[in-house]
Amino acid sequence: MNKPKVIVRTNYKLAINNPDRIKKNIDKDKKYNEHIIDYFSDDKKRALNLVDYFTGKINKHDDINLVMENGKKATSEEKTRIKKYISKQFNNSNLWQIVLSFDKKYIDSNISYDELETKLAKEILPKVFKKMGFEDVKKMFYVFSLHTNTKHPHFHIAFMERCPNTRAKDGKLKYRRQAKISQNVINFLKQETCLSIERNSKFKPMSININKDIEEFKKYFDSNSYNFILKNKNNIILEEKILTLGKMLYENEYGMRAKIKYNSINEDEIKKLTKEIKNDLFKIDFNLKISKKNFNESIKILNSYIIDLGKNNKIKSSNLDFSYTEMKKKYLDNYILNAIVNTTQKYYSGQVKQLKIKGDDVFKEIILNNYKQNKKFSKKDIIRTALSSNNKNYKNIYNIQKAIKNINYEMEEASQEFSKLFNYDEKNK
């Protein structure tokens, strides 16, 4: 039970022109490279197929037990071409080798060999090359073979650089000098292989749950949805912030764009207000909080699964790759911020029906919100704090000042009219 499900072993041969290689071993390494493809493609080590067994086609295949970059098996002609290419390319590129070994029951209970071969060719190895730091995975040459003639089925993998594909310290692309594969890359290969093997049985259902949570989130930012959160008639201040943001976007010419990307905004004040609106939304809407909690729980479940996967393969949590869940969290955060800036600019331009906010409304809302938070303060103290130059939480102080002036003016006017009544009575007397 304590044995790892996947074991990785690595080897390499330094290129003939590699400054670090020992020249006296050149002939030996050339001879080794000439026979490596023959060893890989040995049909006696090929996986048995029941259809082949009953039809009598075992070891009578048209193709060779050698998988190419496109996931297909090579023909005899392609095998000859590959052998010549490796021999020629070895002048400049190192030749790397990996043996990827599995527990047989682990494979049989999760995935077919054919499907795993396809995943290795098109998904796993390209990710590994990127992890190693090669500039362009399309400029990597690689082949591999599955051998099932031992207790543990295993892949033999060989790869090279087709052209200079490593960014050197001087910024130029060169053939890689260093050949040793780091433990970090080995751990990544183990993790990606296990995720691919268990994708349908374990990883995929967890991933689907995360995507469902994200889709639920999107409903809150759809102007046609009943749950549309950026049109909250019960929170005047939030509504005013939304309109203020729309105005700022328009004045900085972002409102002229068909679609705004939050990360493309350079103005700090706009970005700050956008994040402020985002935080306010989570404070005022209970359902939105629940949706975020569900999303975080789904992320936690998948991360726990990756940690357990690491334990089963003797990989520490600190050496695991959580880029998938980090990417999902970043995607959701960017989606919310993008939705806010795009909806607010539509509000401001009149594409979405907006509330008409008066200074008096904002004035009353500030008093009500502050009074709920601390009932010890008088209305006078609340207003003084709101109008303070140090208070940067409220953007449209002009509206409040105007509202107070209007109230003062109306009270003064009413007082004068009231005084006239008494003057009229005096004259009558």
Image: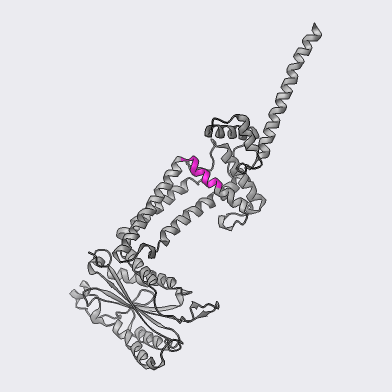
Which SS does the magenta portion mostly show? helix
Start-end of magenta stretch:
276-285
The answer to whether residue 419 shows anywhere in this view is yes
357 falls in the magenta region: no
Q: Is residue 358 above or below residue 123?
A: above
Q: Which residue occupies 49% across, 81% down? A: 164
Q: Is residue 24 above or below residue 142?
A: below
Q: Which residue occupies 33% across, 62% down? A: 199
Q: Is residue 57 above or below residue 351?
A: below
Image coordinates of residue 284 in percent, x first then y, are 49, 40
Point out the residue furthest to the front here.
Answer: 376
Point out the residue furthest to the right here.
Answer: 427
Q: In which quadrant is the N terminus drawn?
A: bottom left
The answer to whether residue 358 shows anywhere in this view is no
Q: How many marks?
A: 0
- Using the image as rendered, state which of residue 416 and residue 210 is in the foreground: 416
- Using the image as rendered, state which of residue 39 and residue 419 is in the foreground: 419
Q: Is residue 410 above or below residue 7?
A: above
